[in-house]
Image (cartoon, grey):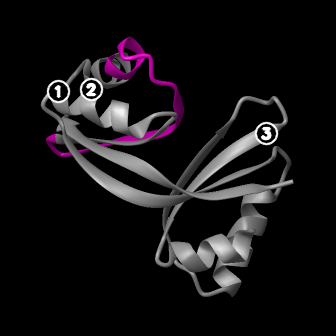
Amino acid sequence: MNIVKEETELHVITPNEPGIFGRVLGTLANAGINLRAYAVLSEKDKGHFYLVTADNKKAEKALKAMGFKIKINKVITVEVTDRIGVGAEIGALLGSAVIDIKYSYGSSAGSGRTLLVFKTSNNKKALKTLQ
């Protein structure tokens, strides 16, 4: 069974410098916040962390205290059975519904479940399509 939700993602903008990955994730760990999903990329002089946590309010407070800029995004999370082709199936469903995927990331630890995160052009329609 798929579990589909609209959730909040924190987009944390940091300096792009050595050690920033450890500082951002360490801030969450020190605050006792479970990180459910993340994607990280660097672009010129900025680092971009896309985070879905178990407690976004607490995470936002801890990260703002470090001086990082934070944007709030609404995303769709899909927890699915970990199997070959599941991402392609979701992509096809969203494409057939004429929903643009702005970006997506996900992870599986091989325990039988995978969490996928989607930022789309129409989260409300994506939620209906995937439920």
Q: Which residue is mark 3?
A: 113
Query: Where is 100 relative to 7, above or below?
Result: below
- Quadrant position of the N terminus in the picture: bottom right
Q: Which residues are magenta?
A: 27-45
| x and y, in percent, of residue 100 in the image | 52, 78
Q: Which residue is mark 1?
A: 65
In the image, 10: left or right of 17? right
| x and y, in percent, of residue 10 in the image | 36, 46
Query: Where is 92 relative to 47, above or below?
Result: below
Label 1: which secondary element: helix
Label 3: which secondary element: strand
Label 2: which secondary element: helix
- Mark closest to the chain's N terminus, 1 or 3: 1
Amino acid beneath label 3: Arg
Question: Badge 2 local density, few (<14 within 10 Å), some, or many (20+)?
Answer: some
In the image, 104: left or right of 23? right
Question: Badge 3 local density, few (<14 within 10 Å), some, or many (20+)?
Answer: some
| x and y, in percent, of residue 67 in the image | 12, 31
Q: Which residue is mark 2?
A: 62
Q: Is residue 78 magenta?
A: no
Q: Residue at x 37, y 58 (%)?
A: 73
Q: Is residue 34 magenta?
A: yes
Amino acid beneath label 1: Ala
Q: CA distance from mark 2 to mark 3?
A: 29 Å
| x and y, in percent, of residue 102 in the image | 45, 68
**CB under 8 Å between callouts 1 and 3?**
no
Amino acid beneath label 2: Ala
**CB under 8 Å between callouts 2 and 1?**
yes
Query: Where is 108 relative to 25, above or below?
Result: below
